Amino acid sequence: MSDSKTVFAQGSTALITGGASGVGLAIAKLCKGKGMNLLLVDRNEEALKAAVSDISDVSDSPTVKSFTADVSKLEDWSKLQELVTAEVGSIELLVLNAGMGMKGGWGDHDYFRTTLETNLFGVLHGVNTFLPTVKKAAESKRTAIVITGSKQGITNPPGNPAYNASKAAVKSLAEQLSYELKGSNTSVHLLVPGWTFTGLTGGGQGKEKPAGAWAPEQVAEYMFNKMVDDQFYIICPDNDVSEETDKKRMLWSVGDIVHGRSPLSRWREEWKKEAEETMAKTQV
């Protein structure tokens, strides 16, 4: 069994996409607190500069570097790889966290293409580009890959098909990667935040965090503790939804297949009452 705690080792390097804000920035701060060097990647150059300024200090150790990139563009990954080779050397923790949420629906080609290119291919490009680098580092150190998913990619609520599909695919890819790296010095983890107060979920400067939401720092700390326990599925609760409730919702969702119900039955009028009653009495 791997000991992912040692991934957060002083002098090791974490590359974090979507690192300029939200959960990505919170993970960066956690890593820096463990003495890790940082390479923050984000497409928002101004936010990236502010993030680096926020977490840097007067000392040169640990180092904090940044790179402006659009994770959907393979050419940006190639340039990032060149930077890592020339200036960073090794990557012990790869956090593929960048994502976006658009509003759209059927017939909106841009909505589907842009969402999938960012949320799905942004992860694929990251794994394909840096898996060799992480495996090389694993010859002498513990290494890890963290991929950010979503509960919408598991329970698939109606209303945002492109986002749900992208996160369902990311879950599948993370599972495949974990299996292929079993027994190696590299662990893989699927980070699934609950309701978290970030820019993606309506948070912003000057806005007050809703009581039901977690702060990004809570997600980062929860992730760290689950990685120490060598957990692949890191399903975060929040102040409104408990771990038990999440498990019940997931069990009901997969039950649509097992029991031959209509898809997304939990949200259909003819199934709502039974779904609520069943989940209320289900033991998990």
Image (spheres, rainbow, N blue to C red):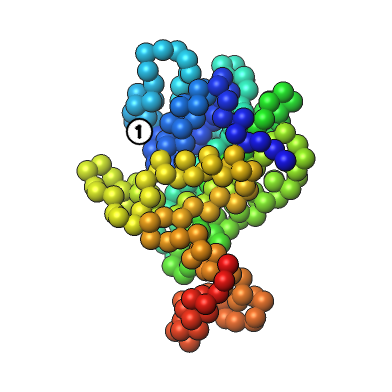
Residue 189 location in percent, x, y?
A: 61, 45
Q: Residue furthest right?
A: 183
Residue that mark 1 sits on = 47
Q: Residue at x 40, y 40 (%)?
A: 217
Query: Up-down: is 134 above or below 236?
Result: above
Q: Residue at x 41, y 12 (%)?
A: 59
- In screen coordinates, is 64 left or right of 173? left
Q: Residue at x 50, y 84 (%)?
A: 274
How packed mark 1 is, by other alpha carbons closer than 10 Å (few <14, some 14-19, many 20 or more), is: some
Indicate the amino acid at tag 1: Ala
- In screen coordinates, is 102 left or right of 134? left
67 or 144: nearer the viewer? 144
In this rendering, does residue 129 appear at all?
no
Query: Up-down: is 264 above or below 147?
Result: below
210 or 117: nearer the viewer? 210
Residue 277 location in percent, x, y?
A: 48, 81
Residue 2, image quadrant = top right
Residue 23 location in percent, x, y?
A: 43, 42
Mark 1 lies on a secondary structure that is: helix
